[in-house]
Image (cartoon, grey):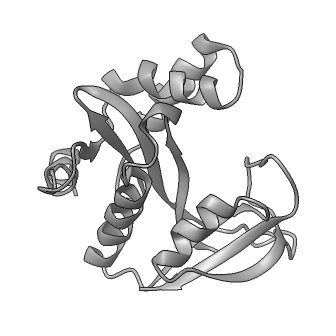
Amino acid sequence: MTEVKIAAEISSVRPHLDFLVRQAVVDDAKALADLWCRRKPQDRAEAVERARRAIAATGPEEVMLAADLSGTLVAYGRISRFRRPEDAPGTMCPSGWYLLGITVREDSRRRGIGRELTRRRLEWLRKRGIEQAWYFTDFDNERSIRLHEEFGFEPVRKDVIFPGMRLDSQPMVLFGLTL
């Protein structure tokens, strides 16, 4: 599927919402980096470059959605297909489609943006005939856990690892949802 088709499928405003959910574009890299830097202090230039690479990775197995409020990127969420290496430790997450990296700017929370990004990511997976969605978080991230449980996610396993991810606390908990 081309980037244009992905963007057209995702970009729409639901009448009762005051923000737009759309595919992230390279021009969003600075705003995305600012979100990352607000959440966890880091070198901004490195964050911008990392954001550019993440957005550029969009394709059939990696999509980044953005929530746009009055022309400003205020949140993002990713969908990514993970392939577990054959020699992976037993605690590594299974292969499959993951909802990753949802972040909403502090001053834009409590508007349903995280919920809508989650709904849209699940919708994207369903349209492709994906039968299982995964997500993981810190065991004490109650806000994220409640949000995903609203969509039917259930805990599957504790103490999991995912390549390149280090969350604020341990252990991480894996949740699954049959679509």
Which residue does the image show at 79% across and 65% down from the upper left? 139
Q: Is residue 149 left or right of residue 175?
A: left
Instruction: Point out residue 166 in the picture as x, y percentages from the top left corner.
Output: 79, 47
Q: In this view of the protein, which residue sits in the foreground, 140 or 49?
A: 140
- How many numbered badges does the structure rendering display? 0
Image quarter where the N terminus lies is bottom left
Which residue does the image show at 35% across and 30% down from the upper left? 73
Instruction: Point out residue 4 in the picture as x, y percentages from the top left corner.
Output: 16, 45
Which residue does the image show at 46% across and 51% down from the upper left? 78
Q: Is residue 97 visible?
A: no
Which residue does the image show at 28% across and 36% down from the upper left? 68
The image shows residue 61, relative to residue 66, as above or below, that is below
The image shows residue 12, relative to residue 135, as above or below, that is above
Specify the quadrant of the image occupied by residue 112.
bottom left
Image quarter where the C terminus lies is bottom left
Q: Is residue 57 left or right of residue 143?
A: left
Q: In this view of the protein, which residue sits in the foreground, 133 or 142?
A: 142
Specify the quadrant of the image occupied by residue 154.
bottom right
Instruction: Point out residue 34 in the picture as x, y percentages from the top left corner.
Output: 52, 21
Specify the quadrant of the image occupied by residue 94.
bottom right
The image shows residue 162, relative to residue 89, as above or below, that is above
Q: Is residue 162 visible?
A: yes
The single residue placed furthest to the front in the displayed view is 110
Q: Is residue 56 left or right of residue 138?
A: left
